[in-house]
Image (tube, grey):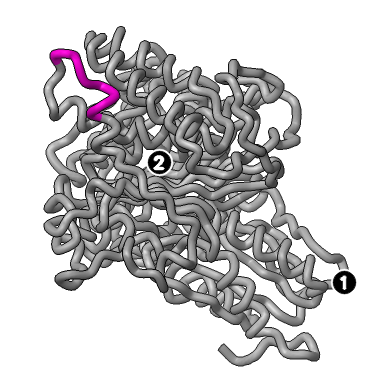
Amino acid sequence: MSTAETTTMPPHTEVPSETIPRVAIRFAGDSGDGMQLTGGQFTNTSALLGNDFATFPDFPAEIRAPRGTTFGVSGFQVHFANENIHTPGDIVNALVAMNPAAFKVHIVDVEPGGIVIVNSDEFTKGNLKKAGYEAGYNPLEDEDLVSQYRLFQIPMSRMTRESLAGGEESVRDIDRCRNMYALGIAYWLYHRPLDATLDFFDHYLNKQKKRPDLAALNEKALKAGYYFGETAELFATRYDVAPAKMPPGTYRKIAGNEAAAIGFVTAAQKAGKQLVYAGYPITPASDLMHALARYKQFDVKMMQAEDEIGAVCCAIGASFAGALGMSGTSGPGMALKAEAMALAVILELPLVVVDVQRAGPSTGMPTKTEQADLLTAMYGRPGEAPVVVVAPQSPADCFAMAIEAVRLAVHCMCPVVYLSDASLATGAEPWLIPDLDSIPAIKIEHPTAVEGEKFEPYARDAETLARPWAIPGQVGLEHRLGGLEKDEQTGNVSYDPENHDNMIRLRAEKVARAASVIPPLVVEGAADAKTLILGWGGTYGSIATAAQRLEQQGIHVARAHLRYLNPMPANIEQVLRQYDQIIVPEINTGQLAMLLRARYLVDVASINHIRGRSFQVGELVDEIKGLLKNDGQVKTS
């Protein structure tokens, strides 16, 4: 879409409008109420209007939790603005709650005076009991509670049925349109056009699913909700959020897993290689496999293996055969892939393993986010088995770091771990589609046989220490590979103590030398700052916004974000020693902080939350301020 693109708006009413800079709206209901679809459509429409946005899909892991219960609530938050934003927002300005359970779970996040729209039909005695309210209590009748918000009770279930009555459709199909009725109200309230969602009905339900009846039902429900807002005289004000000023170009909405898939396909094309992805379904990494399966026209081969071990071994085999081997997983799957990744280390073959981190340990909270796999990525293999580790910092950055992962895998001839997380994988933001010609080619030179010379499969490039990537089955390039230690010259099996010592150090040095081909760490913020806020991965948005708020309060801090974890940028020690204070916020118990202390002998103060979600900016600001002494020194954490 173009940022300047305009869409058709339904006729305006005389209700006064107020222009505001940003809104965070959350749709919440049962996991079967279509809240993810509702939030996604609201996001698409906001994107077409040129708003900057960030999303936070929040849903239970259970396929279908008992209906009406708090642990079955599904939510989708959209933060849209007329300026550059980085997070889905700390507080909710407007909540649309489809039942008592959704109201109970999410009302605590709504700002005082915020808008709360509830489907009052669902606040029945039975549903209130399922939501865990005491017998005889209805929160909508609690004056102390509702006086804190602008509460709008709308009988959406009844209104939806009445607006769709007269046809042959089942009650079940009609009731499933309540989310579109609610979306119509939200569209009216925030001056959003209906066009994009109507196009979605036509494309998806009518043409793709061959269900014109459902397309018509949803269209009627959406319009009914919109015109309810128009005619009910319930709302005293409507709200406008102007387009954001963004660099010119063509944008699209993109989620992290989707961006990663496009990035890996682009990298394979830039390398002139077939991409072979072997995976096993696991939340929240499965979307990556689903996305790659749609790119077979770009010579992508995707296979679902019998388990995580089989998947990564298939990817290693693909790399041995000369393709780009990839596998992907989430937390528990990394443990299963560990030994095979160590095999790839000693084979010295390019391999990319995607780890979409989720809250653990074990099954943990599989739809919630965490950054607790950093040490697993760094050291979670038997023996000394170093690999390259990279981490995207935003959903759109997943594209760029996917290309970097492939580039480094073939540069170093070693595995690369790509550390995404659940918030990046499912969150979305605008993405400026790059000029593909501006992305450099990934150069790969396979060895060829030279008459009279014996091929040495472990003869290394003097600069990178990478061994040659020989395609099997070629005369003169015959060689064997396996998990046993190699002679550093011939590649034959060797138990020589000195050779083993040398090979361990060579493989480590090869990874360390990759620092010469990664960009330096960039520091932003006040030049006179004595405190550096250093983050990595998916915490970028929260840290950047927190640093901006501190600056607005007259507190000077510098900030930097690591996208390369192993090796780290060559200038990191120089950067660390420029500051009196270093604060590292992480969604774990302090894994990066521990690495920095051990490697560079610097004092680091940690801020650690392990709550299954990204940092709240307000909390982060308060905690950073709490670590600062008046004289600019860090308190003991």
| Residue 528, label in figure | 1
* Marks 2,1: beta carbons within 8 A: no
Q: Is residue 79 in the magenta section?
A: no
Helix, strand or loop at disc 1?
loop
User: Residue at the right extreme?
Assistant: 528
Distance from Cα at disc 2 to Cα at disc 1: 40 Å
Image spot of residue 297 (x, y percent): 38, 11
Q: Can residue 151 be seen in the rendering of this structure? A: yes
Q: Quadrant of the N terminus?
A: top right
531 vs 593, nearest the viewer: 531
State the residue at coordinates (49%, 56%). Answer: 150
Magenta residues span: 161-168
Horizontal and vertical percent position of residue 434: 64, 25
- Give the prevailing secondary structure in the magenta stretch: loop
Q: Name the spot of residue 85 as percent of width and height, x first.
A: 64, 48
Residue 164 included in the magenta stretch of the image: yes
Q: Nearer the viewer, residue 280 or 458?
A: 280
321 displayed left or right of 9: left
Residue at the spot 33% in from the left edge and 58% down from the top edge:
103
Foreground mark, 2 or 1, reads 1
Q: Is residue 412 left or right of residue 4?
A: left
User: Quarter of the image containing the C terminus?
Assistant: bottom right
In which quadrant of the rendered view does residue 404 lie?
top right
Q: Where residue 352 is drawn, which disc sits there? A: 2
